[in-house]
Amino acid sequence: MSRIFNFSAGPAVLPVEVLEEAQCDLVDYRGSGMSIMEMSHRGGVYDAVHQEARANLRELLNLPDDFEVLLLQGGASMQFATIPMNYLGHGQTADYVNSGAWGAAAIKQARLVGNVNVCADCEKDIPARVPLQSELKQTPGAAYFHYTTNETISGAQWKTVPKTDAPLVADMSSDILSRPMDLAPFSLAYAGAQKNLGPSGVTVVLVRKSFAERASKAVPAIFRHPTHIEAQSLYNTPPCFGVYMLMLVTRWVKRVGLERLFRQNADKAALLYQAVDASGFYRGTAAEACRSDMNVTFRLPTAELESEFCSAAKKAGLDGLKGYRTMGGIRASIYNAFPVEGVRALVHFMGEFERTHG
């Protein structure tokens, strides 16, 4: 078996031991005579997987008792629409932070539903950043306050939780379980699985029951959070294989430990940022105070060199480094499962590429 170092932003690298366990279970899950992808989602074998995945998330995130763990479909992009459909009522205003492409995407969908106040907008700022608390122009009595904890494209990450009197809602797709986080201030948090939780296809929604009680009854059942709370995320057929993988990945996180993963993530990012900062050839694109531990972004002197850099890196077994199409540059995504050896290999490659092209 020959595996490369995969810097893809998502779907992203998974722990090898998780992939190997899934490989063993693929045809015959624990002596059931069926794959997890073939069995009924109403049966006891799958239900044990489903409930463990939810319980593991609850334990790892130390969720308060009044939170529900939902395992849904549609990605974070569906939640961009579902959240305002549920919680942005007629005559109300929701506060949104636009700190990058994904914050902007959430705003676009919310505006189709109701009134949105963009309480801070730094999407176009160079270097990329998130706003200061003092920059947040909040609406008194807002329906909720929404922000994106880590902007995957620009590489800007919130290091603290913003303060608000409104119910706090966050898209945590690209840094959930990458660091300890107190969910007590939040009313709702959500994340696509394909960064730190598993393969694409599962969306985790963590919602406070008292907040979910506000959900509009005029929304079709499939889009209402209370529907899925009542059905324990089994209202319709769930993405069974994705939930199984989520169970395995959260088991792996429990074995490694969240604090240890956080230290590893910070150390991996520091290695890359040190290589960028020590160079006159590479230039970081995120403000130092907001640099992401998950998505390290930088530029080379020209777009042509960036293209050559990506091509040469791929030949060296370092793939997925091309920046997002609207951003350009280089993006190294180094989620929980990404090995430190891969970061060291990239740092070495960067040094050699600068030596030969600088």
Image: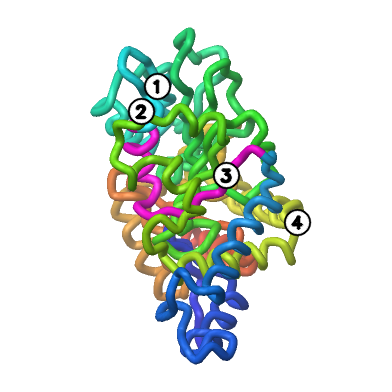
Tell me if label 3 and label 4 are in contact, CB under 8 Å.
no
| Label 2 vs 4, first from the N-terminus | 2
Name the residue beneath numbered marker 1. 121
As drawn, the label of residue 260 is: 4
Residue type at mark 4 is Arg
Tell me if label 1 and label 2 are in contact, CB under 8 Å.
yes
What kind of element bears circle 1?
Answer: strand
The spot of residue 109 in percent (x, y) is: 28, 33
Q: Which residues are magenta?
A: 66-85
Residue type at mark 3 is Glu
Tell me if label 4 and label 1 are in contact, CB under 8 Å.
no
- Disc nearest the viewer among 2 and 4: 4
Name the residue beneath numbered marker 2. 124
Spatial separation of the CA atoms under disc 1 and disc 3: 31 Å
Spatial separation of the CA atoms under disc 2 and disc 4: 34 Å
Residue at 66% across / 58% down in the picture? 56
As drawn, the label of residue 68 is: 3
Residue at 69% across / 52% down in the picture? 60
Residue at 45% across / 33% down in the picture? 128
Residue at 52% across / 65% down in the picture? 349
Determine if the magenta segment contains residue 341.
Answer: no
